Amino acid sequence: MTHLLRADARENRDRVLAAARELFAESGLEVTMRQIARRADVGPATLYRRFPTKQDLVLEAFEDELAECSSIVYDGSADPDPWRGLCDVVERVLLLNARNQGFTDAFMSAHPDVVDFAAHREKLGRVVSTIIRRAQAAGRLRPDFVFDDFAVILLAGRGLTAAPASTRDAAVRRFAALIIDGLRAAGTEAGTGQECT
Amino acid sequence: MTHLLRADARENRDRVLAAARELFAESGLEVTMRQIARRADVGPATLYRRFPTKQDLVLEAFEDELAECSSIVYDGSADPDPWRGLCDVVERVLLLNARNQGFTDAFMSAHPDVVDFAAHREKLGRVVSTIIRRAQAAGRLRPDFVFDDFAVILLAGRGLTAAPASTRDAAVRRFAALIIDGLRAAGTEAGTGQECT
DNA sequence: AACGTAACGGACGCATGCGTCCACTTGCTG
DNA sequence: CAGCAAGTGGACGCATGCGTCCGTTACGTT
């Protein structure tokens, strides 16, 4: 008996997923199903049998990224210092997104027709909101900061995916640093022993 | 004698340009020549006769934006207070770009095959560099700020074009404000009578 | 008013992506 | 090791964008 895929089928499926991850990361969600099939050395039919719609492929290809996104947020939430937690979340989420054009597209719903991560986004958003509140209560985060600002920052980070890959990480880190400096509550300068990271 | 276009031709040409400006602004440079022709109520041939290549169309369609971009930078450069000048440049350039998806694409060379504004970018970049230097000399801009950081900010602003049009301006202004707060030299808090704007 | 030509736009041939069908191959099981 | 169902990929028909050609229209001149 065997409810599982045949060995060759399983291997093809894995190659398709690997190809999809590579291409999505490099070029975003607008890569064609054909390109993915070609890169995986597989006929179009094979691809479509395993993943009838692009949405199916995207969801599975980004399972890891989604999980990492969650850990980032929960790590930040678990940090006893909410300000440091928030800083980490900002920087790490920005990096994650900048490294993976496709995940950014998906997570920000740049292509709502293809895939919608709104549910995940909302759930993580609530956690981030609590970090924000705690960081403000601790007097470290500017009091006028709201969750929408966080969304704006992520959206802005999206633009950095256009930077050349060689300098992208540096650009993102620099961007995160600039933003974070703009988030401090007045009177809590960096360099006073309170800085983040 | 008449070296000018025939009346109907001129009118069609104008309609094409108007249509192109609208579509580029709404949807970026990837709109098709056909879409532009359709919106202008004109056959494809007419479009291609006036603008043999998309590059030609883009260049003329964004003449105004390019000019405005220049004035923004030169206005900032002419401001006796270099810090205020820099703040204005940042906010206004971000707004200009966020309002016009296509201009952002073109100016940031998101589609180098279609059009390359590198020359303009470089020229304006030099002016911005001088503003940066003067603002730092005045002790208002953080001393570690370099021109590449400015580019990063613009690139990031690009991401905001993905925000819904209804809230885009607000998002951009908020983003600019956050960034600017991150640019101040240590010790020059907002609210001490030195704030920008 | 009549005419020559600038200007027009529909239609063509080409390329590419889509999702599906089907004749052939091959891994698994008995 | 034999047979069958699972698995495969090439090829098809459709849709859309591309840039160009060419028969028709109508502007502006005389």
Image (cartoon, coloured by chain):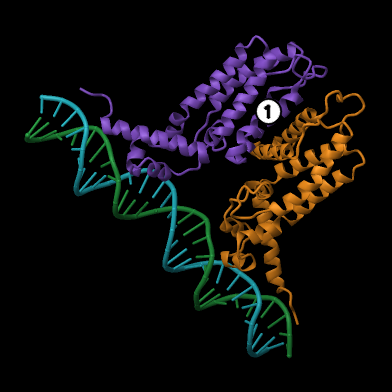
Chain colours: A purple, B orange, C cyan, D green
In the rendered view, tell whether residue B182 sits above or below residue A37.
Answer: above
Closest to the observer, A91 or B97: A91
Q: Mark 1 — on which chain does it sit?
A: A
| Quadrant occupied by the C terminus of chain B | top right
Residue A18 seen in the figure: yes
Residue A155 seen in the figure: no
| Amino acid type, mark 1 | Ala
Q: Which residue is mark 1?
A: A176
Q: Percent from the top left, x then y, of residue B20?
A: 66, 56
Q: Percent from the top left, x then y, of residue A89?
A: 62, 21
**What SS does tag 1 mark?**
helix
Q: Percent from the top left, x then y, of residue A129?
A: 66, 18
Closest to the observer, B146 or B82: B146
Crowdedness near tag 1: few (<14), some (14–19) or many (≥20) residues, C-alpha within 10 Å: many
| Quadrant occupied by the N terminus of chain B | bottom right
Q: Quadrant of residue A119?
A: top right
Going 77% across and 31% down the picture, which residue do you hit? B144
Going 67% across and 66% down the picture, which residue do you hit? B12
Q: Is residue A99 left or right of residue C27?
A: right
Q: Quadrant of residue A12?
A: top left
Q: Is residue A190 left or right of residue A13?
A: right
Q: Percent from the top left, x then y, of residue A140?
A: 75, 15
In the rendered view, tell whether residue A59 sits above or below residue A186.
Answer: below
